[in-house]
Image: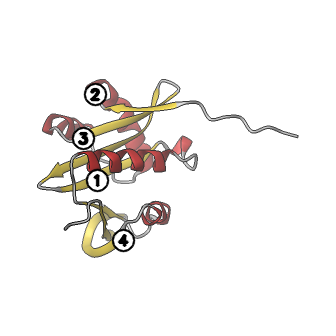
Amino acid sequence: MITPMAEPPTTIREMNHDDLAMVSDIERRSYEFPWSHGVFRDCLLAGYQCVVLIREDRVAGYSILSVAAGEAHILNLCIDPDVRALGYGERMLDEVLYRARSASVREIFLEVRPSNETAIGLYRKKGFHQVAARPAYYQADQGREDAAVLVKKLVVEE
């Protein structure tokens, strides 16, 4: 019998400026129209909740969360294409949800490309549902692509 190899341990920690090169590299390899290095730097400087997932001493994923006025917005959540389908996206999303709850957030929002079926499946599994669409939100090869706006309630209002 063949025993599957165990996945190496991972940790999630605050993103720092030294991580930006690896984060930008993952972003470039993941998206046709990636965020720039400067956008990630600005997110750190703005005080957004920026975290990285570390696997074998390397950044393997990251997320950017904005929190304000009882709401949160997942601005970016990405796993390195070389280590996808290993549960890291779910682990990172669980971390983001934990951080939002810890900040007493009532609702958490995100935009996702309707063509990103894998991400939509994960978000639905975690209790997100679509509340709107943003026409022509994302740049695409042929013009623009809409965004599905998803939300999850975190605190039951009394």
In three-dimensional space, the C-alpha distance between marks 4 and 3, rounded to whole angstroms, equals: 23 Å
- Mark 2 vs 1, N-terminal side: 2
Give above or below for 102 relative to 139: above
> How many marks overall?
4
Residue drawn 59% across the image and 30% down it: 8
Residue drawn 36% across the image and 31% down it: 13
Residue drawn 62% across the image and 35% down it: 7
Residue assigned mark 1:
74
- Mark 3 vs 1, N-terminal side: 3
Give above or below for 27 relative to 108: above
Residue assigned mark 3:
49
Instruction: Name the element at disc 1.
Output: strand
Point out residue 94 in the picture as x, y percentages from the top left corner.
41, 49
Which one is closest to the eye, mark 1 or mark 4? Answer: 4
Point out residue 139 in the picture as x, y percentages from the top left corner.
30, 62
Amino acid, disc 2: Asn
Instruction: Name the element at disc 2.
Output: loop
Residue assigned mark 4:
129
- Mark 1 vs 4, N-terminal side: 1
| Residue contact between numbered discs 2 and 3, judged by CB atoms under 8 Å | no
Q: Residues within 10 Å of mark 4 (few under 14, many from 20)?
A: some
Residue 107 position by quadrant: bottom left
Residue assigned mark 2:
16
Point out residue 156 in the picture as x, y percentages from the top left corner.
26, 65
Amino acid, disc 1: Ile
Instruction: Name the element at disc 4.
Output: strand
- Mark 4 vs 2, N-terminal side: 2
| Residue contact between numbered discs 4 and 2, judged by CB atoms under 8 Å | no
